[in-house]
Image: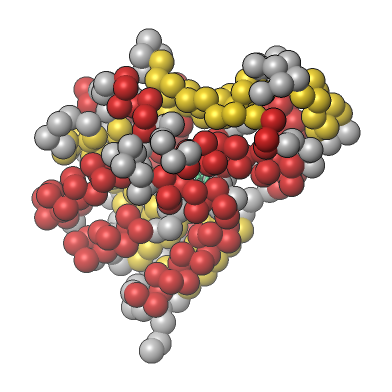
Amino acid sequence: MSLAPFRFADLRQESDGRDELLAGLLAERAMIPPKYFYDDLGSRLFAAICCLPEYALTRSEARLFAEHGSDIARATGTGRLMVDLGAGDCGKAAGLFPLLDPAGYVALDISADFLRDALERLRRRFPALPMAGVAIDFTRSLDLPESLLTPAGAPRLWFYPGSSIGNFAPDAAREFLARIARACIDAPGGALLIGVDLVKDKAVLDAAYDDALGVTAAFNLNVLNVVNRLLPADFDVADWRHVAFFDAAASRIEMHLEARREVTVRLDKLTRQFAAGARIHTEDSYKWTAAGFAALLNEAGFAKLKQWQDADGGFALFLAELV
Ligand SMILES: C[S@@+](CC[C@H](N)C(=O)[O-])C[C@H]1O[C@@H](n2cnc3c(N)ncnc32)[C@H](O)[C@@H]1O
């Protein structure tokens, strides 16, 4: 079996990560950005979260793709270069290949080894499709080497599913979407297909981020293992517990790690003491109304929108174009 071209580039800069982590952990309100969840184990734990009965988001999105796939394909057209932002196991994009018939696939993710393994498997399923993998922190830059964006000239479909946009506060989300809009100006014909979790009942959202099996707790706590390796630091996971809740006023899930007792932690060459009950903020996951997210896309520069929403109004897919 002959395989279509495949390239993999690692554009991450590890030293930046150490400074960012140290600044966050020494801040008065200690925080760890959510992108650090995703080492190999974190990526696997996230895949497990998507199977949990409480985490309906992935199933709602999959239902929308199943029910409206042909309509979505008519709207996007076929033969595009699909650029997957935070591809994870690449499963969502792969599910759409038969419908969207892309000319190429470029998967971006910060979790390099997990991405490379996923793409190796995907190449065997779709041997004729040109593919590239890029290990990158796309909050720093979305500039991609043209040599990876093949076939050249194919109109691009930026694919950002799973409501990952929810990790950005509204102003930062607008700015990130505007960067994608600018990329659609630079390479004309571009479009964005994005999935967004919508505001819903607090009890449903609380459970989605604090499941009975404790998988989300393990995902949250594992970030301390990542920090221990990267800084290095000496967090003991057993000293911390998972806290997650929906703040309706801010329209966001907050995830924290809370000290079970007074803890002193070595952070590279420094130390920090955390009182019992002190928290480290690890993630926000903003929930949008469909109208609010449509307005955000408009403000980011996307003038033409098409949207699909599930029957219970829990999740929305948007196709956003410039004109
Ligand atoms: C919530 S998961 C979503 C995975 C998959 N797209 C889905 O919808 O199920 C977020 C994905 O984005 C990746 N990611 C998070 N922050 C990132 C960043 N700053 N740059 C690149 N990838 C990032 C993670 O490694 C992870 O695979």
Q: Residue 128 location, x and y as percent? A: 34, 78
Q: Residue 307 location, x and y as percent? A: 17, 37
Please give the name of the residue rendered at 35% of the width and 49% of the height, measured from the top-left corner: 51
Q: How many marks?
A: 0
Please give the name of the residue rendered at 75% of the width and 20% of the height, measured from the top-left corner: 262
Q: Is residue 21 above or below residue 215?
A: above
Residue 310, by quadrant, is top left
Q: Residue furthest top?
A: 249
Residue 92, by quadrant, is bottom left
Can residue 229 be seen from the camera position used here?
A: yes
Q: Is residue 168 above or below residue 218?
A: above
Q: Is residue 218 left or right of residue 51?
A: right
Please give the name of the residue rendered at 29% of the width and 39% of the height, measured from the top-left corner: 56
Q: Viewer-proximal residue, 102 or 279?
A: 279
Q: Is residue 215 left or right of residue 303?
A: right
Residue 129, by quadrant, is bottom left
Q: Is residue 269 above or below residue 263?
A: below
Q: Residue 79 location, x and y as percent? A: 25, 64
Q: Residue 59 location, x and y as percent? A: 26, 45
Please give the name of the residue rendered at 38% of the width and 25% of the height, measured from the top-left corner: 206
Quarter of the image that includes the C terminus: top left
Q: Is residue 184 left or right of residue 200?
A: right
Can residue 132 be seen from the camera position used here?
A: no
Q: Residue furthest bottom?
A: 1
